[in-house]
Image: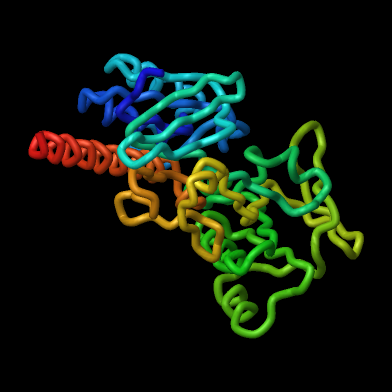
Amino acid sequence: MTERDVLIIGGGPAGLSGALVLARARRSVTVVDAGEPRNAGVDHMHGFLTRDGMPPARLRETGRTEVRGYGGEIVEGTVTRTEAGRPGEGFVLTLADGTRLRGRRLLVTTGVTDVLPDVPGLQERWGREAQMCPYCHGWEVRDSRIAVLGTSPNSVHQALLLRQWSPDVTFVADAPPAGEDAARLAARGVSVAPSGVRRVVAEDDRLTGLELADGSVLGCDAVFLAPTWVPKAGPLTDLGCETGDDGLVKVDPTGRTSVPGVWAAGNVVVPFGQVVMAAAAGAMAAAMINADLVEEEVARGLAA
């Protein structure tokens, strides 16, 4: 089994950015990608300087080409098991087809799964008229009718933000906000629906409104909500990396986990991070991984 300097699980912006930095540092690096990008349903990404409006699939394909151009390897597959060898022996990945890969260091960039509330019709609109991030998609729905679903403690803040893009924002929740939340929404000019949402209304494959629990229909052109984030942390769990109360892996500012030799970057660490943030985190982790390998090589030289 050929040993690579670094194995990367996940071929999104964080993983490919990390692979590019490492390959340019003349490290042998292999990216294992399951082909399940978080933003698969999105036509265009935004907020990435020089890449604004680019389809996510094109970014990934361009990134793969760049990584391969420096000698990096991209492997299509799903990691089913992650093991740490004895001290100094690195890590072994087992893929679904039985392939085994060995690496001295490991970078996990597997992202998260967005779990939506059980609202009929919502899943079909996700990534289209139903979105999460105002900074990613607020411009595209500017001055239109926007509904914000009260799905999390951050939903009021989300509604307050979206008022920046449109004068027509309505907050929809099973229990109408009260107290300070209600006052803040009113001060910002955000309307409050009389009841929660029953289902999404669409015509000609386009969102047109929300049917509310009281039977009325709230006309809207876009829906924003905060999904529940479930990290795809299988490799990190296999290795015993420490996690926080929120279920996310704990890392230092460079992406280093509690397990020596293992880094994590991107949405598996920061679920709300935009594409540009994930790419930056992957680059940072890669630089620190290379520095860690250098120190290991220096120690070996001194010992010899």
Q: Is residue 136 left or right of residue 47?
A: right
Front residue of 212/115: it is 115
Front residue of 145/138: it is 138
Front residue of 28/139: it is 28
- Quadrant assignment for the N terminus: top left
- Seen at 57% across and 48% down, the residue is 231
Q: Position of residue 236 (x, y in %)?
A: 49, 46
- Quadrant assignment for the C terminus: top left
Front residue of 5/269: it is 5
Q: Position of residue 84 (x, y in %)?
A: 43, 39
Q: Position of residue 144 (x, y in %)?
A: 62, 49
Q: Position of residue 15 (x, y in %)?
A: 41, 33
Q: Is residue 5 visible?
A: yes
Q: Is residue 232 left or right of residue 299?
A: right
- Seen at 46% across and 29% down, the residue is 11
- Seen at 16% across and 41% down, the residue is 295
Q: Is residue 53 visible?
A: no
Depicted 127 relative to depicted 189: above or below: above
Q: Quadrant of residue 125?
A: top right
